[in-house]
Image: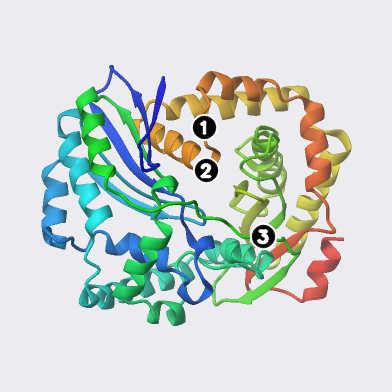
Amino acid sequence: MYVKRTLPNGVRLISERLDTVRTVSVGIWVGNGSRYEPAALSGISHFIEHMIFKGTEKRSARHIAIAIDALGGQANAFTDKECTCYYMKVLDARLQNAISILADMFLHSRFAQEDIDLERGVILEEIDMYEDSPEDVAIDKLFEQCYADSALGRPILGTAETLAGIDSAAMHGYMKQYYRPEDTVIAVSGHFADEDLEYIAELFSQTEGTGRNRIAPAQYHPSLLLREKEIEQNHLCLSFPGVSLLSEDRYAMNLLSSIIGGGMSSRLFQSVREQNGLCYSIYSFTTPHLDTGLFSIYTGLGAETEQQALELIVRELRTFCENGPEPDELSRCREQVKTTLLMGLESTGNRMMTIGRSELLRGEVLPIERVLAAYDSVTAADVLSLARRVFDFAQVSLAAVGQPGKEETYRALLQ
């Protein structure tokens, strides 16, 4: 059972008590990510995420690292397009120690200029690391091009040019403006006491600020991205406009993705890999955001087989739009999705992630029974109708990274 409490300053504290475990996970969720940033400060949210571990007014970076390790738990953070999260997982008896460290980092980071200059180099190495992964390049660069005229299309990590202009004053100013109490959720899942929640409420009652961060709507543009890279395979990402994370079609969308490319029994895995041996890896995935989303298919294969593979992918999508899912296919994928959800509930970390993200981005946390019922209510007609809307080849986008062919060849394959 979820319990939600809103502090006088607007911070939301959502908790889920589990009496059968000894661990507890806590996360500080902020409704701020890369799509809220001014263009000149692209990457600052992710930069701040790094810097929050680099020292506060009373703890050095080494002190923080030692204190976290001494708890015997796990601590980390991440930044995406629409939120940032700082989290820890510890034994129940150490929750107050853990959250006191997190709160100090969150509320009182120094952002010393010498630390910023050092960490900038770390992030530049992180950018280079992603460049060394052609799968990431194909997926991320296509996303950036599809939303090129909006903040949603800018990279989460920023660029060397934008990172160069970020200093201590910029970080302090950005946090003051964009880390608002009403955009902050503290999520707790696991074994804890009432006094633990009171302690958390007291810590975060001191945050100041008013209002909510607002996004500028993003517009999807069909795109073709061809990028040469000295690698053995071509890495392809095929994308269509999908649904947002607030859409009522999100359950049907997850089932559609599972049927098309969600596992070994999926249509694309069976057709492209098992029956024709054209690739090692092929899968589909969704990328939902507050106001938009993508449905994508990724595969990596040799240049000599990519034309045949693309023809098969297009054929499978068109066949699905003609006939829809088979009864056993929908039933099998429905059980797969539901089982994955239920198995995830065995981890306090997964549960904290679910309730924190849901409260922050949707403003509510649905009981698992309602989520399972929503999947049960999706019919074959629902999935077919959604597929016919999504798989519109007038709106298709494609990235090819490696040794791509000619632009007109790809366009002809996708007609």
Residue at the image position 68 percent from the left and 40 percent from the top: 270
Query: Which three-letter amino acid code belongs to the residue tagged 3?
Result: Ala
Residue situated in front as seen by the camera: 65 or 177: 177
Question: Mark 3 packing: few (<14 Cα in 10 Å), some, or many (20+)?
Answer: many
Residue 349 in the image: above or below residue 372? below
Q: Which residue is mark 1?
A: 364
- Image quadrant containing the N terminus: top left
Query: Which three-letter amino acid code belongs to the residue tagged 2?
Result: Leu
Residue situated in front as seen by the camera: 273 or 175: 175
Question: Mark 1 packing: few (<14 Cα in 10 Å), some, or many (20+)?
Answer: some
Residue 374 in picture, x, y percent from top left = 64, 24
> Tag 3, which secondary structure?
loop
> Tag 2, which secondary structure?
helix
- In which quarter of the view is residue 26 placed? top left
Question: Mark 2 packing: few (<14 Cα in 10 Å), some, or many (20+)?
Answer: many
Q: Which residue is mark 2?
A: 361
The CA distance from mark 1 to mark 3 is 24 Å
Tag 2–tag 3 contact (CB < 8 Å): no
Residue 228 in picture, x, y percent from top left = 61, 78
Residue 22 in picture, x, y percent from top left = 22, 24
Residue situated in front as seen by the camera: 41 or 155: 41
The label shown at residue 218 is 3
Horizontal side of residue 188 vs 157, given as left or right: left
The CA distance from mark 2 to mark 1 is 8 Å
Residue situated in front as seen by the camera: 153 or 187: 187
Residue at the image position 44 percent from the left and 69 percent from the top: 43
Horizontal side of residue 72 vs 360, given as left or right: left
Query: Which three-letter amino acid code belongs to the residue tagged 1?
Result: Glu
Residue at the image position 13 percent from the left and 62 percent from the top: 60
Inspect this view and state whether residue 19 appears: yes
Horizontal side of residue 109 vs 266, given as left or right: left
